[in-house]
């Protein structure tokens, strides 16, 4: 039975996959609006910074205001004209009391909106938690708490995955729940092509994505403010796209899930259209740019927003069939998907986790690749790194073994680090160059991961 039919069958039998969403930005808002239209899937709770905006969005999406419950941690709802039930969490003395009060709520046909993200993993009725924040620190706490509470985790937070994904995967297996990066992100879309080629015994030469924006390593939220506004995007998120960090993160995620690796630090990122890929992303001996095969990369050209895989085969029989089927004359061939649908595809991962206990894409190979921090400008002692998509640093993909040997600071740990010495523009930033927040859940999970996973 196909996945859609499985969901229809669950709906007929009265079974609901109860979902909690952390983060109601560009991705999370779409999930809140659309998930309830998927058979057998129901959003029961969302955590948001802006209760008022999320309340308005939920009503616009068709949620009955009589069934909305607000769990308010900081008084955000005090000045709202509300008909909804409001629980003032400031009056709850202990975490145990808070969880007890929340779990007494019958979530049938109800929607909890809260500004306390720690609530979602603690709700017993929830089956799947979706992290739609893009913040590694939040992702660490949310994912760990969800796994401890026996919830499946579907993450759109690839930034957290390339920082602590291997330890989260290990913990999820021990807890018999799923940890997975969401379908719809480029890594998951490429993984589909990779699995297809691998099952058919085709040799993967290169796999990657088309980059949507021109590459500018030194872009920042101020230079991209108007462009981000025109696209309805957060300027920090837009900066991570333009300065290349997001592509590095996405390809590191793919690398750790497949064993493919970058050919060089930062990848090649050639300018190439679809028709050129089988001439460019191939070995140097055959006129291409690769020093090895089995690599991840990105291209600037007409492929965006699609994903690709260049492959070959040693079989003359397969080559003959590929030519007959109009896949070119070889020896290198291309399969590609001209789109990825981001969070629109997240229900696939939710369903696979709940029904099959199966991940869409997770770091099965542990750490193959790392995304290291590089100074975006000259830095001086006392400067504070502002992390992914900011003013101070950008990310480059590197082999994990090299990054570990050179003591490079992962980009996912960079936010909030205090610089201890002068660092030149475009110089790699090392652990020894900064003071790091030792109280961070993200940092402590990373330390455990470095000891247990490598």
Image (spheres, grey):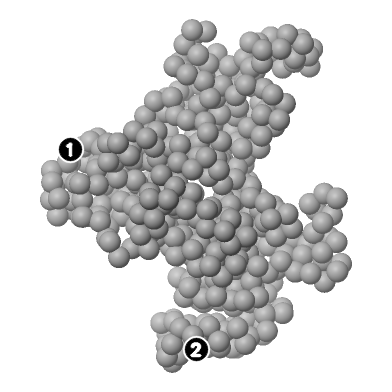
Vertical position of residue 220 compared to residue 436: above or below: above
The residue located at (82%, 49%) in the rendering is: 2
Vertical position of residue 344 compared to residue 216: above or below: below
Judge depth for marks 1 and 2 and give the one in front: 2
Position of residue 397 measured from the top left corner of the image (x, y, whole percent) = 39, 36
The residue located at (42%, 28%) in the rendering is: 267
Of residues 313 and 415, the one nearer the viewer is 313
Secondary structure, mark 1, is: loop
Contact (CB < 8 A) between labels 1 and 2?
Answer: no
Position of residue 77 measured from the top left corner of the image (x, y, whole percent) = 47, 84
Residue 424 is labelled as 1
Whether residue 41 sits left or right of residue 279 in the image: it is: right
- Check disc 2: other Cα within 10 Å, few if <14, some if 14-19, many if 20+: few
Whether residue 36 sits left or right of residue 299 in the image: it is: right
The residue that label 2 is drawn on is 97
Secondary structure, mark 2, is: helix
Q: What number of labels is visible?
A: 2
- Sequence-first disc among 1 and 2: 2
Give the Cα distance between marks 1 and 2: 51 Å
Position of residue 390 measured from the top left corner of the image (x, y, whole percent) = 32, 50
């Amino acid at each position: 039975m196909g996945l859609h039919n499985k969901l229809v069958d669950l709906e007929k039998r009265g079974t609901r996959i109860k979902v909690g969403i952390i983060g109601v930005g560009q991705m999370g808002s779409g999930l809140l609006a659309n998930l309830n239209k998927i058979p057998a899937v129901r959003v029961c709770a969302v955590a948001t910074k802006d209760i008022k905006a999320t309340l308005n969005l939920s009503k616009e999406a068709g949620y009955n205001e009589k069934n909305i419950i607000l769990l308010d941690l900081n008084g955000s709802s005090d000045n709202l004209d509300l008909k909804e039930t409001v629980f003032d969490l400031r009056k709850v003395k202990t975490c145990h009391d808070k969880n007890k009060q929340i779990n007494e709520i019958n979530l049938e046909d109800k929607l909890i909106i809260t500004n306390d993200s720690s609530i979602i993993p603690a709700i017993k009725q929830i089956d799947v938690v979706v992290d739609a924040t893009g913040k590694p620190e939040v992702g660490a706490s949310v994912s760990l708490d969800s796994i401890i509470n026996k919830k499946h985790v579907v993450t759109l937070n690839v930034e957290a995955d390339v920082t602590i994904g291997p330890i989260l995967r290990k913990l999820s297996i021990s807890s018999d729940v799923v940890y997975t990066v969401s379908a719809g992100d480029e890594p998951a879309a490429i993984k589909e092509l990779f699995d297809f080629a691998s099952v058919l015994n085709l040799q993967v030469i290169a796999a990657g994505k088309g980059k949507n924006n021109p590459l500018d390593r030194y872009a920042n939220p101020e230079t991209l403010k108007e462009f981000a506004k025109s696209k309805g995007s957060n300027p920090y998120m837009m900066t991570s796209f333009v300065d290349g960090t997001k592509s590095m993160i996405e390809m590191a995620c793919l690398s750790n899930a497949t064993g493919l690796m970058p050919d060089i630090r930062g990848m090649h990122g050639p300018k190439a259209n679809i028709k050129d890929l089988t001439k460019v992303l191939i070995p140097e001996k055959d006129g291409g740019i690769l020093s090895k095969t089995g690599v991840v990369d990105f291209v600037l050209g007409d492929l965006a927003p699609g994903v690709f895989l260049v492959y070959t085969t040693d079989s003359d029989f397969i080559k003959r069939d590929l030519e007959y089927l109009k896949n070119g004359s070889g020896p290198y061939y291309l399969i590609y998907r001209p789109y990825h649908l981001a969070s629109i595809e997240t229900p696939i991962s939710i369903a696979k986790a709940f029904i099959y206990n199966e991940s869409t894409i997770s770091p099965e190979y542990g750490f193959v690749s790392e995304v290291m921090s590089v100074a975006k400008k000259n830095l001086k002692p006392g400067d504070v790194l502002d992390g992914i998509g900011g003013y101070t640093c950008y990310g480059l993909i590197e082999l994990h073994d090299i990054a570990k040997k050179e003591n490079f600071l992962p980009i996912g740990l960079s936010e909030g680090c205090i610089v201890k010495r002068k660092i030149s523009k475009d110089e790699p930033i090392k652990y020894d160059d900064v003071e790091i927040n030792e109280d961070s859940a993200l940092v402590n999970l990373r330390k455990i991961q470095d000891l247990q996973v490598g």
